[in-house]
Image (cartoon, rainbow, N blue to C red):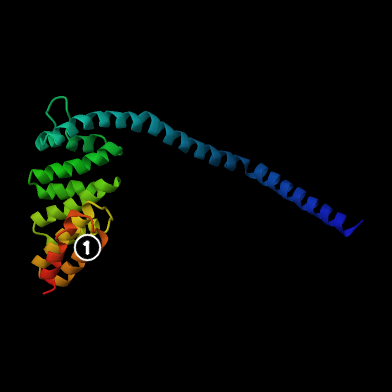
Amino acid sequence: MSKKEQKKQDELANVEHALTSSELFIEKYQKQIFIAVSAVVLVILVILAFRNFYLEPREVKAQNQMYYAQDYFQKDSFQLALNGNGADVMGFKQIVSDFGMTSSSNLAKAYAGICYYHLGDYENAVGYLSKYKLGDEYLSCSVTRLIGDAYVELGKNADALKYFEKAGNMNNDIISPVALKKAGILYESTGEPEKAAKAYLKVKDNYPRSAEARDIDKYLARVKK
């Protein structure tokens, strides 16, 4: 027998041995394997049932309620948007509490926070806005900046600066330069001209076409005296 044929036979023997070992392993532990596979299948079925028969119907109901609350919001009826009309329309607060785990509930947190801000309740504004899980790029940046605005109203400048800086670094062409300019002005008020200059320079260099960049040189000149 040639070396080539011998090598081939050895390889076949190794394969047969591996298959035999696998068969023996399966035969020995078939009960445990069956239980494990059944458990995985059961988990998958539970997840699918939970999503299809619980989450999706709740999402539809939540979206229907969001439509009416958003209508109040667009009319600047922030109290009604927040609390509902006491009859057939839920407010954002109730949507948050009644429809947890839905995307509508998450969005309602942002809306509720904005309503509280407009109503002058800055503590609750921060509370709801902070619970919003960042998603949509524009809304996420707006929410982050608004948390900064609420902290300013509460006299918590260090917290406000943290959120203005965060929004400024989110690379949103509309909101980020607004947040950076707010940060610069706040840094000026706290006696930190170098940090103010850094924020203003970001507006000038990163967002030269923004409305905030039009007169940013005036602000830079003020802190570089």
- Kindly identify the residue that appears in the image at 14 percent across and 59 percent down: 182
SS at badge 1: helix
- Kindly identify the residue that appears in the image at 29 percent across and 48 percent down: 137
Outermost residue, right side: 1
- Kindly identify the residue that appears in the image at 26 percent across and 35 percent down: 99
Residue 209 position, x and y percent, is: 23, 56
Taking the image as drawn, is residue 159 in sight? no
Outermost residue, bottom side: 225
Q: With 190 as the anchor, is 97 left or right in this view? A: right
Residue 101 position, x and y percent, is: 30, 39
Quadrant in which the N terminus is drawn? bottom right
Q: With 48 as the anchor, is 192 left or right in this view? A: left
Residue 208 position, x and y percent, is: 23, 59
Q: Quadrant of residue 81?
A: top left
* Amino acid under disc 1: Lys
Taking the image as drawn, is residue 147 in sight? yes
In depth, the one of 90 and 165 nearer the eye is: 165
Residue 171 position, x and y percent, is: 28, 55
Residue hosting label 1: 204
Outermost residue, top side: 88
Q: With 15 as the anchor, is 90 left or right in this view? A: left
Classify mark 1: residues with Cα within 10 Å, few (<14), some (14-19) or many (20+): many
Residue 197 position (above or below residue 74) = below
Q: Quadrant of residue 213?
A: bottom left
Residue 72 position (above or below residue 109) = above
In depth, the one of 2 and 211 nearer the eye is: 211
